[in-house]
Image (cartoon, rainbow, N blue to C red):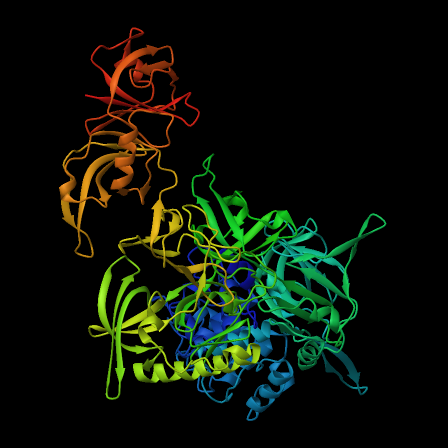
Amino acid sequence: MRNLKRALSLAMASIMVLGMMVVGAGAVSYDDFSDKDKIVNDEAVSMLVELNVINGKDDGSFDPEGIVTRAEMAKMICVVLNGGKDPSLGNVSNYTYTDTVGHWAAAYIEYCTTLGIVAGDGTGKFNPSNTVTGAEAAKMLLVALGFKSEIEGFTGANWAVNVNVRANQKGLFDELSINPSEGLSRDNAAQMVWNALDAGVVSYDYTLITDGSSITSSPTLKDDKDDKTLLEDKFKVAKLEGVIISNEYATSTSTAPEKEGNTILLLTSDDATSGKDEGAKITLKTTTAANLLGKSVTMFAKDWKNGSYDTVLGNPVLSSDNLIATITEDSDSDDVNDALKAAGIKTVKDAVLVENYVRNSDKVDGKDVDRTVSGMEAVSKLTGNGIEVTVISNDDDNEADFVIVTKMIAGKVSAYNANGNDGDGYITVTPFTNLDDSDDRISGEEFDDVVGVKDVAKDDIVLYYRVDDTYYIEKAESVSVTVTSTKGGDTIKDGSDTYEQSALSWKFDDDSSIKKNANLTDVVEIDDEVTLYLDNFGYVIYTDGSESSDDYMFITGADASVKTNFETLTIKAVLNDGTEVTASVNKIDGKKLSTYVENAKEDAKEDAKEDAKKDAKKENKDYSDLDLEKEVLHQIATYTKSGSSYNIKLKKTVAIEQVKKGNAKLSGNYSANSKTIFVIGDHNDNYKAYTGISNVPDVDSVGTNGVKVAYVKDKETVAKFVAVTKAKTSDGDTEGIYILGKTPSAKKNSSDDTIYVTQAYVNGKYVAELELEGYDKVDGEVSRGYYGGVTTSGSNVVDWHDLLNAKKNGADYSKDDWYDFGSYVTDCGDGIISSQNHKTALTYDKDTVVIVVDGTKEMAPGDIDEVICVDGAPSDSDVVVIVPDDDDEHADYVFIIR
């Protein structure tokens, strides 16, 4: 179980004792029982195990439905009377019953007989192996509490009736649905013994009566509710009733919680053991749950010393005095009033406000003063989807005492280093909201300060909150859905399942920015397959999705014929991955072709009417015809395949202004990101696909009839798909190309067209296949050398004509484009180098990239002095190309030609 879950959920609504309980060497704990899920009276069983009154079977089970024998019940009574320790009774020398001779429980039976707790069947037998009935067990426990059998009528013909009356009065049958005349199970026996331990011990006052000739005594039962319980009397365990006001996870009295393992209880009744009166605060050395703050509980403790109880048994038990209303959704004052009314709470005025488990206070005259709640409207302003607002009245007076707000922070783990810089580990979480308090941000926090940190990992979507200097973190739950409909800005549906956005997030996917009025429906579309990340109440804090069955295409050609009883549409398109397809289309937007055309004509007629209202000259224009080929050409669509054919959905496109590598801006209103798909076509209608702005080349210009369009989802600004035709492109940051090969090699591209490639260095990196766009076999060899100022498309395509233009200029470095096939070094050393072609000396340093042109080696910076400038003089045999920077002062590259 996550540590955060432990902090929040040590006690559930019923606060049953389910935790680990150490009961001494060799003993078991409740959690050790293999069949604990079958135990009904779990609190009673847990406490009795911890008190060492009962234990399990040899096979590791508790066997809750198993029977309790008369002998076993006698032993339990003996252990109870001895404060949880097995009494040392020695060997029996004089047996009361004929059937207990040599029996394992003989000493316990004799002890109980001596105290009047048990008796035989009147025939001299005890019947130790018989099942103990509810009435028999109750009699034993009543006598253990101090009742006298001979006084109370626990003997004779009607003993069972008299026992059952007293048992009901003392609460021995509480929480039980049994027939006292029937056998008692181990589960029910545990509950009855626990009820007895929580009951007050009794005694008798005796009044002497004389008639002149004799003296008799008349007993009067003394049963005061303030008397010690059997638990207090025999186990020295105090029963404490009070309100938890602070622990290690939460506090209503300070801005910092208690130290680890401490709980502060505000007593609502006197405690005789500690001598503390109602209204006093006492410390218990135990860990309790954060969600118990402000609630009235009963606790059991012993070993009072130095102002605190050192030993606490079990977990707190919620009092029936608590009236609790929990609100986890956005609510107005009427909604709040209804929720509180249902819980029995009439007013919240002056209730103490606790936010994220610490007291909320204001500074007044330099002192911290508790903030309180003024009314229902004030509570409503604290609510929101995924924010837990708990209103507590802990003394059954219908007036709220505490309003506890738990508002977690949603975010994504952006850094996670288990070792850290100093071996301690650190974590950073990027929140999905703007945080008012920088201390709430997990930024490089050490693992020791983040509870639950080992249950999360990098890129996890998480929820956390802070108490003082400690953060409590957990991984958000997720669910995969297919969006079938949306409603408003905050609701999506998957069939009958509805999901609303959480108030804990202002950002619902990677592509969105943080906005207080962010809408969940802005980041999804119908038919999207989406992973929803949820807060603890099922509201959406984040999404991670993709379109389910549809992929994108850009339609580059079309041939259509739509006639009566005959309709065809064949398209040529480029898919996401750059694959070019030619295929027939069955349906457009879910309609067969003829239906789509007719609907489109009707839409055109309506457009004509609207145009006529604006401009009378357009009144006679014919809008009734529709050219399906033109309708789909250069459109972006999503598609599904049906056999070898396609069903397409045309997307509404917007015009864009630019496409630049590494630049997110497409136009004034629209942008691209790392997930945007680009399809770029050149003047020969050769298309390439790119994913992300860092991979797409610059579009320098668009030729005649070229288009630049994008598909952007409604209410979004980031393009999903961009298409450009008739484009002249460049990488934008290409610094030149060194051609290694002479005769280009022919090969087929993905469209089965013949292209020509050669080896080259581009931006100092070796490229095995640089495509020569526009090259034809008749153009012959490509001159080896460096082509300055020539740019590439996608780092692997260069325009053949750009190379030819550069070559015409030769080694004229003053030109934008130039060509250098290499020349001898004329000067080098002491950070200066020049050549016959670049006579002006250039500086070189550690940033100068040195490449040996054999296709295999790039040298480390500084090797010029070792290879060319040996002993400060140039080598007579070295031929180089020196590539200057834009200012013609520094050598960016030096190619050594061998």
Q: Nearer the viewer, residue 345 or 161?
A: 345
Q: Based on the displayed image, in which of its 4 quarters is residue 391 positioned?
A: bottom right
Q: Based on the displayed image, in which of its 4 quarters is residue 400 positioned?
A: bottom right
| 830 vs 159: above or below | above
Q: In this view, does 777 lie to the left or right of 555?
A: left
Query: Dividing the image into 4 quarters, which one contains the N terminus?
Result: bottom left
Residue 446, how many percent across, how many down? 52, 42
Residue 637, visible in the rendered structure: yes
Query: Dividing the image into 4 quarters, which one contains the C terminus?
Result: top left
Residue 17, visible in the rendered structure: no
Residue 373, how many percent across, how many down? 76, 66
| Count of residue discs | 0
| 819 vs 723: above or below | above
Q: Nearer the viewer, residue 725 or 360?
A: 725
| 470 vs 273: above or below | above
Q: Based on the displayed image, in which of its 4 quarters is residue 629 positioned?
A: bottom left
The residue shown at (50%, 89%) is 179
The residue shown at (19%, 38%) is 758
Q: Nearer the viewer, residue 11 or 93?
A: 11
Q: Which residue lies furthest to the right in this view?
A: 365
The residue shown at (32%, 73%) is 648
Residue 803, how many percent across, how many down? 27, 36
| 518 vs 212: above or below | above
Residue 27, how many percent across, how many down? 43, 60
Q: Which of 250 and 354 is in front in this view?
A: 354
